[in-house]
Amino acid sequence: MRVAVSLSGLKKSFTAGDTKSLVLKGIDLTIPAEEITFVTGPSGCGKTTLISIIAGILTPDSGRVTIFDTPIVAKSRDSTKFRLANIGFIFQQHNLVPTLTAAENASIPLLIRRIPQRQARRKAIAMLSEVGLGDRIDHLPSQLSGGQQQRVAIARALVGEPRLIICDEPTASLDAENGFHVMSLLKRLSSEGDRTVLVVTHDSRIYNFADSIIEMEDGQVVRIDLAQNKSYSNAMRGD
Amino acid sequence: MYVLALKMLCRDRIKFLTLIVGIAFATLLITQQGSIFCGLMLRTASTIFDTNVPIWVTDPEVRSINDSVAMKEDVLQRVRSVNGVEWAVPFSMNNAIAQSDKGETGVVQLIGLDDESLIGAPAEIPKAVLKRLNEPDAVIITRSRSENFGAPMEGDTFEINDRRARVVGVVDASKNFTPFPSLYSTHSKALLFLPPGYKYLNFVLVKPKSGIDPARVCRNIQESTGLQAFQQWDFVWKTMIYWGKNTGIPINFGITVLLGIIVGAAITAQTLYTFMIENIRQLGTFKAIGISNWQLASMVMLQGLSVGLIGFGIGAGLCSVVGLINPRNSELAYYTPQELVIMALGVVLTFCVLSSLLSIRKVVTVDPALVFRG
């Protein structure tokens, strides 16, 4: 098994006033490459903190993060460059720029990499066509439905051809049908590009898209289910 | 990325327009009030411009064109004998009480020109009219400020110190800072209009010989006669500084200009900052994706400078329009030197940069982890 992400002894605490709370209590985890891995668990269990540290956005108190054999030092210039080249993000709130068109939003990661505007736009349009929005390239986010906005966000995440895609509750703001379409799309595009997908979700309707599911509770990994052992309900398919 | 930064700014139309209007208003306030200030200050020296001679010689006590101190008549010969002087002529400027034939009484500024050459007369006086100053009792009156005398016309008469003066011309010379009309006469006639027993030579107008540095001629005059000698613009500056120091004009206009700067800075800073705060989630997304703080700061700076330049262009343009539609010699003193425009540009861009820096501080410290929060 090829490894995409390796975590060892990961601890993270937050201080609010006089209170210090330990959010991650020593996580040791390996996430396989080219698979879709879900991270689930109740609110406050540390899922978002975990992916923030994996993405190199938050600094752990202790422990080590390696992505594709590259050690990640949060907030360093190297990790920012690595993130730009290797990680794509999909957020719960889409986080599209409201004054930019779908094509312009999708081209942002390429423009940050200083790829010429015309070339970036061409790639962004191609990616929007891939996600079924070829006829919506010049629409503003306000002119798109929630599902279409999330597809623009997927195009933005994939346009730079990252090896790892981190998704934070990608279906939480979508209805069942749109959530299913978004996950189907994500699964197809990730398998075509041999990408690793890490999804943080509460949404039990999409669990059957996972190759493995990591369940967290109180800052610790309490269970890892592989696809063949799925024990989760599947609301979408009515299993 | 920078093109997108500009699109993000321009497509948020309400904020974009608020920023442009705020900066344009501040620019207009700075340049328009500055132009009125410059216009007023230049008016204090309008007689110097009208006279248009290279060198002015005055008593050492003189601090401005209006601060005329009489010199002995023999200084004229002493100045003429100074090395480097091509010609030197008398020029007198005194206030006198005049009464028109319509019965109106008031103060006039009586200007005496050299009898032979009539050097020092404003260019606006036609030569044919100027020559008539050699006629008995002849005077030329400026149209501005002459309303107090019932708008005199050619042929009207005045009584000045019991002597008759006859108007041979009414001219549109530059408005000056005093509330009186100017009466041009010859130097010898002007002496007759004034109370007897005094010396009334206030200035000597000098032209240096061709090829000789006027500054050197000024030094020669000062060393030889003990009088003051100024080149034209030095005397203009001395006059403007005198009026600036001895009136509240700079303070009053300075406060208005400062108000313009504060209003413009407040509007710009507040709107740019709000614009950034409202986009903080998107900017956090950029940071999560991998944009560097430098790129992010450059984007914000570009946005700030862009609205600054556009707003400045509109404000400065409006200021120019006011200057263009303001008739020459109107009551509104208005002059926009390029130094004022450059200073206004510097001020506007400085507060745009400072406002942007305030926003940048917020943007570069934004926690990209916030984008993972719902």
Image (cartoon, coloured by chain):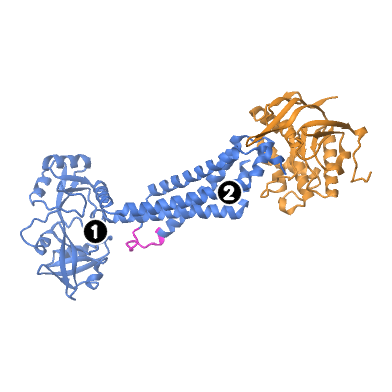
Give x and y (percent) for residue A182: 82, 44
Disc 1 sits on a residue from what chain?
A: B
Q: Main secondary structure of the magenta part?
A: loop
Q: Which chain is blue?
A: B
- Asked whether B325 falls inside the magenta stretch, the response is yes
Check residue B373 for magenta coloring: no
| Chain coloured orange in the rendered structure | A
Is B225 placed left or right of A38 in the picture?
left
The x, y position of residue A4, in whole percent, is 79, 27
Q: Which mark is residue B274?
A: 2
Is A51 in front, or is A179?
Answer: A51
* Residues drawn in magenta: B323-333
At horizontal 7% and vertical 57% (from top left) the residue drawn is B198
Q: Quadrant of the N terminus of chain A?
A: top right
Residue A184 in view in this figure:
no
Q: Is residue A125 left or right of residue A215?
A: left
Q: CA distance from mark 1 to mark 2?
A: 56 Å
Q: Quadrant of the C terminus of chain A?
A: top right
Write down the residue under mark 1: B122
Left or right of B1? Residue B225 is left
Three-letter amino acid code at disc 2? Thr
Where is A115 relative to B41, above or below?
above
Visible residue check, residue B138? yes
**Furthest-left residue in view?**
B197
Q: Nearer the viewer, residue B253 or A231?
A: A231
Kindly state the secondary structure of the residue where label 1 is placed: loop
Query: To which quarter of the image does residue A190 belong?
Result: top right
Chain hosting mark 2: B
- Three-letter amino acid code of the residue under disc 1: Pro
> Which of marks 2 and 1 precedes in the sequence?
1
Mark 1 Cα shell of 10 Å, populated few (<14), some (14-19), many (≥20): many
- Asked whether, in this view, residue B177 is left or right of residue B27, the answer is left
